[in-house]
Image: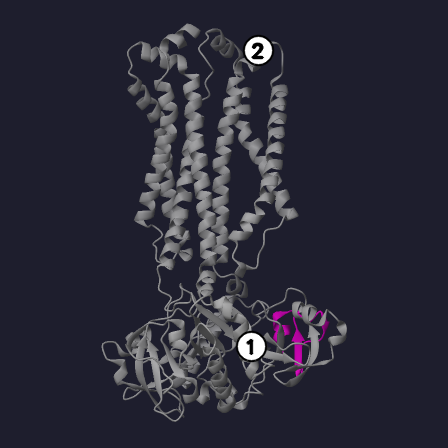
Amino acid sequence: MAATRKRAYVLTGAGEPDRLSAHQASIDFFSVIGVQPAIGRALAQDDDVVLSDAFWKSRFGGSREIVGESVLLDGARFTVAGVMPAGFEFPERGTQIWTPLNLTPEQMHSRDNHYLQVVARLKPGVTLEQARTEMDTIARRLEQQYPATNDKTGIRVNPLREQLVGTTGNALLLLLVVVGSVLLIASGNLANLLLARAVSRQKEVGVRIALGARRITLLRQLFMENLLLSAAGTLLRLFISVWSFEFLSVLVPASLQVRPTLDTTVVVFALVLCILTTLLFGAVPMRQTWRLGVAETLRQSGARSGEPRAPHGIRSKLVISQTAFTFVLLVAGGLMLRTFSELRSIDPGFRGENVLTLRTALPVPKYRGLEPRAAFYSQVLERVRALPGVIEAGYTSWLPYRNLGGSSAFTIEGRPAGRGLQYDANVRLVTPGYMPAMGMRLIEGRVLTAADRAGTEPVIVVNETMSRKFFQDEDPTQHRLRLCDNCPWFRIVGIVADVHQKSLETDVRPEYFVPFDQVPQFLNFAPPQDLAICVAGDPLAVVAAARSAVWSVDDQQPVTQVKVASEFLTDDLAPRKFQTQLIGGFAVLALLLASVGIYGVLSYAVSARQREIGVRIALGAQPAEVVRWITSQGMRPALIGLSIGAGVSLVLSQLMSKLLFGVKPRDPMTFGLAVLVLIAVALLASWIPARRAGRVDPMTVLHNE
């Protein structure tokens, strides 16, 4: 078992100062993970540092000479012990270095904080359930021994693959089902076209068989024709795939760090699948050729009854299957669209359109304690607020979507925690001006101001969730909290709207905001590091000036993660938007293919039955009756397919429950709209050839006959 803790270092003495994303890890971390450095050795001493392959190449040019040399991290010397293999970034993507996790005796015995990430390797023969049972036993024992800190605090044991992949596996499975459905719908159209082509050649085939041609020879000819068609279509598909990469690159969110490329394995798989699909669905007309009766075919041809007819049952079954698959895709696309709409309607709790954010994480050795930090924040804010166009600015421990928030226990005055209730909330240390800069909405009371500083009455501002959970119908501003054992009582002076700190899909936790200089005890784990600057115009226009303002205070201080706050929401919604666009696009494509399939079947039927239609009209049938008759021929299999698709969707939609938000898997509105859209499209696809049938001139048809 090993533990890690996320932190950051400032690298100096080797070019420009840089802020590095790092993880402190216990000495046996790499052996537990089962990955050793590609160059050098793993962590062994307190002053060791292991580099990631990407950072080693970008900063030190991939030189092996760096191993054994020393680097300055936060002003302290560390020895480069080794370099990890390419691609290793565990436990978080973007990790640049690993250093030893050195916990003080006080930290080792503290049970109030839960900031370590623990990984473990199972012993041979031990199952996951056995490990969970053992850890649950340990958790219950700790709860009995330390009820003040371990009450209701359990231990979750999850497989590493599940922890890393999350719901991505469900999304990929859904995408596979969607792509497969579109493939089958397209294959249904292909089978209809090949069937119509084979039926139109029944006379030719019958004559050739009558003249002595073997059926196996004819089947071989049809097979080669289908193979050539498949090869030509596959080459065209390959060209379109390469051409579509630019479009797909726009759809893929930058946060996914994935770009479409021409992968050999995928191309070979697609080629084989396309060829097999063409041949498989081309087997339908070949089967008809094998069963062809020569006398019957020649008799039909001699009767001049028009084009020979393909079996109506096969065509109807193809339309039914196409419609069923299309309905499933429409429901999937509709549910994803409703989910995206629900997420867009959520108030994130801040207004980030005109807010520039940047990080200036201060190195601990240089800025240890309250006074140097307070001086830095004060000078930077003074210079930033003086910039043209700046409305307000303020610091916080973590900006929204950067960190869920450090959790800390607290005590409510006159109300000791008991009966299994543990008072716990996220804490953010801020400077005055942060809340107005982020556009946070005030519900009651006031926000923190410049008057709330060290030496004055300690105050805090809580969010709506904290007010609702811990004070219910009471007025929170009439209460005081104690945030730690050595802390004074803090008066609640205001309530602000909830801010979604992790994502729109994550439930908001109780949270309070406190002036950083009134709780210096918290500076070790939640120091202000992110600066928010509200600008009257374009936030990006003040980037250079903001950097200069920071460097005018400390020219060795890295300025990183420069971003407009509104992009937090864009990045958060990007995967959902991508899923919705992709699945919605496939659903529209499936609807188009299904409508083409219905139209093709009826159009061919009208062409093949013109004599019958002409006779009906000659005997007194009205054109409107013919239109209704042909339309019903197309709508009947479409409605059957819709019914089957609805039943399948009711089952499969439950598998999408983990991908949905704010929408039930069997959402009546989504299912209703899918029914209406599919009926409308099927009706239009049926009406066009039916209208052509109603215009048949019986005299012309009978004269030709």
Estimate the x, y position of residue 380 in percent, counting from the top left: 50, 81
Q: Residue lying farthest front?
A: 388
When asked about the image quadrant of residue 552, the answer is bottom right
For disc 2, the marked residue is 207
Could you tell me which residue is drawn at 64 percent across and 86 percent down? 76
Residue 587 visible in rendering: yes
- Could you tell me which residue is drawn at 38 percent across and 69 percent down? 350
The spot of residue 293 in percent (x, y) is: 52, 14
Image quadrant where one finds the C terminus: top left
x, y (%) of residue 175?
A: 49, 49
Residue 436 on the magenta span: no
Front one among 394 and 35: 394
How packed mark 1 is, by other alpha carbons closer than 10 Å (few <14, some 14-19, many 20 or more), is some
**Residue 109 versus residue 55 in the image, above or below:** below
SS at badge 1: helix
Give the amino acid at mark 2.
Val
As for residue 30 lying within the magenta part, the answer is yes
Question: Which one is in front, 392 or 688?
Answer: 392
Q: Write down the region rendered in magenta.
A: 25-52
Q: Residue furthest right?
A: 65
Question: Considering only order in the chain, which callout, 1 or 2, is on the residue closer to the N terminus?
Answer: 2
Mark 2 near mark 1, Cβ–Cβ under 8 Å? no
Mark 2 neighbour class, 10 Å CA radius: few under 14, some 14 to 19, many 20 or more: some
Q: Quick one: SS at disc 2?
A: helix
Q: Say which quadrant the N terminus sits in.
A: bottom right
Q: Position of residue 281 (x, y in %)?
A: 53, 31
Vertical comparison of 218 with 333: above or below: above
509 vs 420, nearest the viewer: 509
Q: What residue type is disc 1 on?
A: Ser
